Amino acid sequence: MGVQAIVDLAESNGGLVTTAQVVGAGIPRARISDMVKTG
């Protein structure tokens, strides 16, 4: 779970991913900002 889960969500939603979708995929909100900073 992590970056690949977000990539999969983006691919299935035309490149858009919401925070709710990411959290629903089991990724904590705190991890989202870490991933954004990392790129």
Image: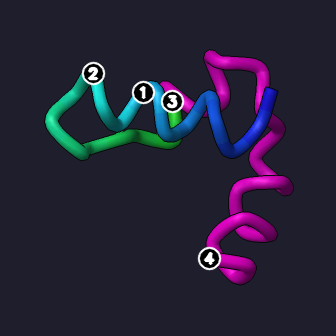
In the image, is residue 25 above or below residue 6?
above
Give the quadrant of the C terminus.
bottom right
Q: Which mark is residue 20?
A: 3
Crowd band around label 2 with a 10 angstrom C-alpha radius: few (<14), some (14–19), many (20+): few
Of the numbered discs 1 and 4, the one sitting upstream in the chain is: 1
Mark 2: amino acid: Ser
Q: Amino acid at mark 1?
A: Leu
Stretch of the chain drawn in magenta = 21-39
Q: Marks 1 and 2, how far apart in space?
A: 5 Å
Q: Position of residue 26 (x, y in %)?
A: 77, 20
Circles 3 and 4: CB distance less than 8 Å? no
Q: Position of residue 36 (x, y in %)?
A: 63, 72
First in sequence: mark 3 or mark 4? 3
Choose the circle earlier in sequence order: 3 or 1: 1
| Horizontal relation, residue 12 to residue 17: left or right | left
The picture quadrant where one finds residue 14 is top left
Residue at x 40% of width, y 40% of height: 18
SS of the residue under disc 3: helix
Q: Position of residue 19 (x, y in %)?
A: 51, 41
Q: Give x and y (percent) for residue 11.
A: 30, 32
For residue 17, what is the image quadrant? top left
Q: Across the whole image, how many numbered discs are drawn on residues? A: 4
Dot 4 crowding, Cα within 10 Å, few <14, some 14–19, many 20+:
few
CB under 8 Å between callouts 3 and 1? no
18 or 13, nearer to the observer: 13
Q: Earlier in the sequence, mark 2 or mark 3?
A: 2
